[in-house]
Image (tube, rainbow, N blue to C red):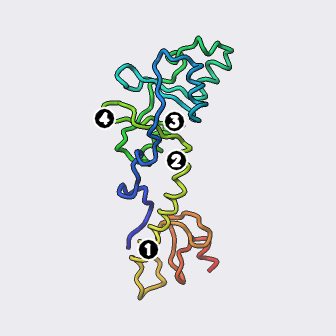
Amino acid sequence: MTNVKSIFDKTEFDMKISEIMTKQVISITPQTSAEVCAKLMIEHRIGSVVVVDEDGVTIGIITKENLIRHVIAQKAFAEQIKASEIMSYPVITIDKKLTLTEAMEKMFKESIRHLVITDSDGKVKGICTDTDIFKVVPQLIFLEQEYIKLIRERDVDENDKEHTNKFAGYCDDCRVYSDELIYIDGIYACPTCSVEQ
């Protein structure tokens, strides 16, 4: 019997971060003013702009939080403040070939909401935000549940419908994830729900 855990443990089911990233990244130079940064964010309805050097390599990022903390809260003149003075650096990046799961792990570990996607030369290829991830995760959870269901159907011995083998997955009754599901009367139940059967 296959003990199913999650499709996130199986790289062939994990989408590449390049599939959900925003490809049109607004970049600026270190000399760009905070005022221009704010106007670009408003114009393009985005939460950040990427600061690049003359070779197009990412050297910093400016988010709404940077503007609030370093310009608004300080009552500074936005037109006089350079991007290099308020940007966050070094920039947390991830290679475009890596997966969504790896990107999520990095964002969680670094406590960031914006992740810059680069190629092997460090050139910006896209940006991924927590909002981008929130949009796609429900779909992945659904796919995970469907995958678990398929594996169960393949593994269950039709001649032995009731057995004591333990499975991992979502309980068919309460929808809670458990490592100790039991197959009873055609459904997979967690320890709590199996007692109620």
- The residue furthest front is 43
Secondary structure under tag 4 reads loop
Residue in the image at 58% along x and 64% along y: 176
The residue that disc 2 covers is 133
Secondary structure under tag 3 reads strand
Residue in the image at 39% along x and 76% along y: 154
Q: Are marks 2 and 4 in contact (CB under 8 Å)?
A: no
Q: Amino acid at mark 1?
A: Arg
Of residues 169 and 67, the one drawn nearer to the viewer in this rendering: 67
Quarter the C terminus occupies: bottom right
Between disc 1 and disc 3, the foreground one is: 3
Question: What is the spatial separation of the Cα atoms under label 3 and label 4, in whole angstroms?
Answer: 19 Å
The residue that disc 3 covers is 114
Secondary structure under tag 1 reads helix
The residue that disc 4 covers is 120
Q: Are marks 1 and 3 in contact (CB under 8 Å)?
A: no
Of the two numbered discs 2 and 1 on the same chain, state the one appearing first in sequence: 2
